[in-house]
Image (cartoon, grey):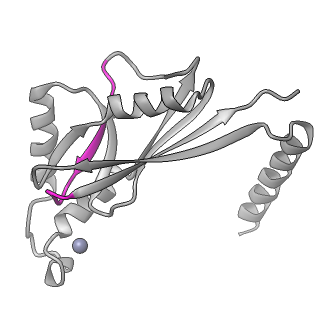
Amino acid sequence: MYDREHDYTEFRSLQASVYLKFPGICSIRGFTVNIWTNERIELVDITEEVKSEVIKSGIVNGICVVSTSHTTTAIILNENETGLRHDILDFLEKLIPLSAGYQHDRIDNNADAHLKAVMLGSSETIPVMGGELVLGAWQHIFFVELDGPRQRTVNITLVNQQKYY
Ligand code: ZN
């Protein structure tokens, strides 16, 4: 308990010193992108949509956070190869099969989707340098539908470093 409080105090003082020396050091902008999924479980490559928002925003150096607000979807980074996309979905189905006696299925028949979402995570953080997302040659950004088909919303939050004059 003491350590947690100590860490928090250090974080606050660091934050305060940054703001005192460099007021207006960053700006934050948020966007949402609507997606219509077609399958119950599906990988949707949203790399181009995110890149397009990064370009439109004018961000130069900073951080891009891609997140989902839904409890039965996820965001992942990986390769967009047809076989691998099937492998990822097959792996998820094997690991967390449908209707395996989950308690949540008593009120909402989608416990497996929630569990898959917990395992994959609801966001990815990608650096932005020189106006471009810093992604490896094979890295794509996927929205993972786990209980579709539905209309879904992806949040893109951009933290942009500002010059201080
Ligand atoms: Zn549910």
Please provide percent x and percent y for residue 142.
Answer: 29, 38
Q: Position of residue 28 (x, y in %)?
A: 63, 44
Q: Which residues are magenta?
A: 138-150
Drawn side of residue 158 relative to residue 2, left or right: left
Q: Position of residue 25 (x, y in %)?
A: 78, 37
| Residue at 13% across, 44% down | 89
Which image quadrant is residue 124 in?
top left
Name the residue: 29% across, 31% down. Answer: 78
The residue at the far right in this view is 21
165 w.r.t. 137: above or below:
below
146 is within the stretch colored magenta: yes
The image quadrant where one finds the C terminus is top right
Q: How many marks?
A: 0
* Residue lying at 25% horizontally and 62% vertically, measured from the top left: 115
Q: Is residue 65 above or below residue 53?
A: below
Vertical position of residue 127 compared to residue 33: above or below: above
**Residue beneath the point at 39% across and 59% down:** 69
Which image quarter has ligand 1?
bottom left
Q: Please, which residue is most extreme toward the bottom here?
A: 107
- Between residue 146 and residue 38, name the one nearer to us: 38
In the displayed structure image, the side of residue 35 where residue 101 appears, left or right: left
Q: Quadrant of residue 20?
A: top right
Q: Which quadrant is the N terminus positioned in?
A: bottom right
Q: Is residue 145 magenta?
A: yes
Describe residue 82's horizontal placement relative to residue 66 as left or right.
Answer: left
User: Residue 55 vs residue 129: left or right?
Assistant: left
Foreground residue, 84 or 149? 149
